[in-house]
Image (cartoon, rainbow, N blue to C red):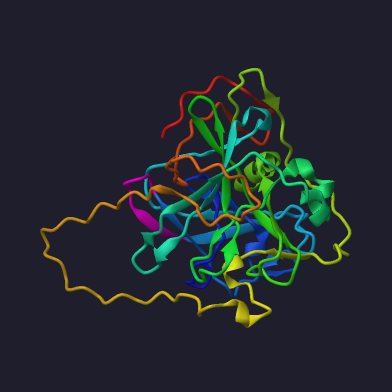
Amino acid sequence: MRNGNQTSCESVLVDSKAGFIAASCLQLNGNAVDEADTYEIVIKYGSSGPTKNLAISKIDVHPSYNSKTYVNNLAVIQFDDSSEVAWQNYIGINPDEWDNEYFIRRSLANKYTNTWNNIIGFDSMETPNYCEEASLTYKANSGDFLCNYAASLSIYNTTCKVPYGVVYAAVQPSDLSMVAIYSHSAVYGESMCSKDRKLHYYTILRNYIGWAAGVIGRPVGGFAKDSSFSFTPTQDYTMKDVSGKGIEGVKLFSGDVYSQNLVDPALLDKEPVQESEPDIPAEPDSTSEDPVSESSPVSSDSSTDSETSSTSPAPILLTDAQDTSPNAIFNPEDPLPAEEPTTADS
């Protein structure tokens, strides 16, 4: 949420007080956050738990973020959950064992009542041939990105498709971990809502958990199924930067894709759907109990681009606060070894 409005920007939470977001989601002066804007994060705690709006108290943009090329397009946010329950999520660190990748979009149906839309998911392990051609950043750093054509309908404009927010990886038989977050899109045209070819890029997070641990001053979890796998992230990891010249005929988009301005208003069949503030109900009886939040099921995305894989998404239930049972915790001062994990919660 930015200044009280829902954005398309999602977060990969590392624990109950911190998470990753794309730096392009922020209003920046250089690499400093513009203090005129306020940011909140909305978290649903499990399939039947409450939803909370938490003020973001601290934001650290990656020191080598480039707002023109979108290299190192990450920031670490910190927030204060007054709950005494602490929890931790775990970032997948071994791509060789990822059996499938799930591109996920979460959104609120109503920001005033914290009612959630169904979670939209698309699964694919395919990398389109045009990924390097459309993005110099990806070409120079292909090991740091996932790339896909897949998109889902915008909640504000049903004629416009937008990229997914985060990516999970499945490791057989039953482990699941968060692995990437949306970075930017390359469009062979002038608008995110046009019918032109688009490719969407997602920053793989494993190389940045050392930096995140250094920022928040506590360990960040990493997950690998293979007990012999060893991975040592550094606090100063950075991608290779590229020329800001760009590619002829390709326009880059990033940040809050819900708010991207259309070059041609005729592309819209109707105005974006606006949320309305609900009527305030009568004061409830003092003996009544708070309702329990219903879970948001994963629904298959029938609106994905035709150039994507035809495989249907698996019916899995995901929440940002899900514990995926780690095998390792990264401490800023220690390397990250792999150990045998326990079965992930579902």
Q: Is residue 110 left or right of residue 223?
A: left
> Can you give x and y, in whole percent of width and height, for residue 92 in the image?
60, 35
Which span of residues is magenta-colored?
Answer: 45-54
Q: Measured from the top left, where is residue 104 in percent x and y? A: 53, 49
* Spot occupied by residue 172 in the image (x, y as percentages of width and height): 53, 26
- Is the C terminus in the top left, top right, bottom left or bottom right quadrant? top left
Position above or below: 86 against 78: above
Q: Residue 318 occupies which quadrant of the picture?
A: top left
Query: Image point 78% across, 51% down: which residue?
Result: 130
Residue drawn at (46%, 59%) of the image: 107
Asked whether the viewer can see residue 221, the reply is no
Residue 47 is left or right of residue 255, and the answer is left
Whether 47 is among the magenta residues is: yes
- Is 132 placed left or right of 269 in the picture? right
User: Viewer-proximal residue, 162 or 233?
Assistant: 162
* In magenta segment, residue 8: no
Q: Is residue 340 above or below residue 143?
A: above
Q: Residue 98: image x %, image y %?
A: 62, 31
Please name whichever residue, 196 or 163, is drawn nearer the observer in this view of the structure. Answer: 196
- Measuring 55% from the left and 53% from the top, which residue is drawn there? 11
Q: Residue at x 75, y 55 (%)?
A: 63
Of all residues shown, which one is farthest toward the top? 228
254 over 46 or under it: above or below = below
In the image, is 72 to the left or to the right of 50? right
Q: Nearer the viewer, residue 19 or 148?
A: 148
Tell me which secondary structure the magenta stretch mostly adopts: loop
Q: Quadrant of residue 96?
A: top right
Can residue 126 be seen at all in this image of the molecule? yes
